Image (spheres, rainbow, N blue to C red):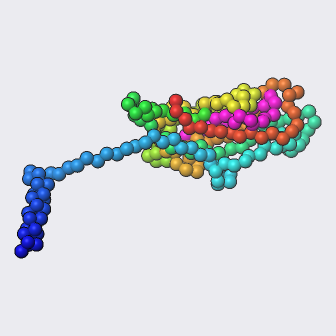
Amino acid sequence: MKNLKNYLVCAAIAGFQFVNAQDNNDTNIASHILNVDVPEVALLDIFDANTNTEAAAIVFDMSDATVSGINAEAGLYDFQALSYTNLYLNYTSVVAGASNANGYDLTRKINVRFETGSTFPGNLDLRITPDAPVIVTDGGTVDSAGTVVATGVALGKTVPVGTDALLVDSIESVYTGDDNQGVKLTYTVEQNGNFASFKAGSYQSTIVYTLTDL
């Protein structure tokens, strides 16, 4: 009997708690809160369509400027014979749409530089020329993909090793797509100064692209 009384008491308490948990004011509409947190995003890579892989070592053989084709002639040195194209900057950016208390950025840019410690022949520039961004459907707009520096940048003599140069400006929320999407790049070599400073040797530079905050 004692066990039965204890059971009835427990059942009564449970029933009270169940009833008490109801608000007794239900209608044909119900709702609840859903919070969505969207973080800032800044992702970047370089795709080489010549190899169908992410970009790796690229070799400029200066002998191509002096001993092949029309350049196999004493008295000539044609830097324009050297170029590399079909590189693509793929990037994803998520920014805020207006000033905000979280300090989220409103736009981004892509800078490029020769990494500190790089070596490059004297009185020479590597010109990096970007095409306007090409992005996947609904990945963004012409405006949100950013604006390229149409003349490109010249690393070496013009922009010294270790110094950033602006390549793409005013990037907002966008994803370009992978592989042959984004900003197409072409590398060329230009003489910039007296040829007397151009010396034989092996040079190695690391080219660094950064999708950063403004």
Q: Is residue 60 left or right of residue 130?
A: right
For the point 11% across and 54% down, the residue is 20
For the point 87% across and 33% down, the residue is 199
**Which quadrant of the figure contains the N terminus?**
bottom left
Q: Is residue 180 left or right of residue 97?
A: right
- Name the residue furthest right: 74
Give how far across and how far down residue 185 sits, in percent: 64, 41
Q: Quadrant of residue 72?
A: top right
Give how far across and how far down residue 7 sits, in percent: 11, 69
Q: Quadrant of residue 149?
A: top right
For the point 78% across and 31% down, the residue is 124
Magenta span includes 131:
yes
**Extent of the magenta region:** 112-133
Give how far across and how far down residue 142 sits, in percent: 48, 37
Residue placed most toward the observer, 25 or 203 = 25
- Name the residue furthest front: 2
Q: Quadrant of residue 156?
A: top right
Residue placed most toward the observer, 104 or 112 = 104
Magenta span includes 150:
no
Q: Is residue 26 visible?
A: no
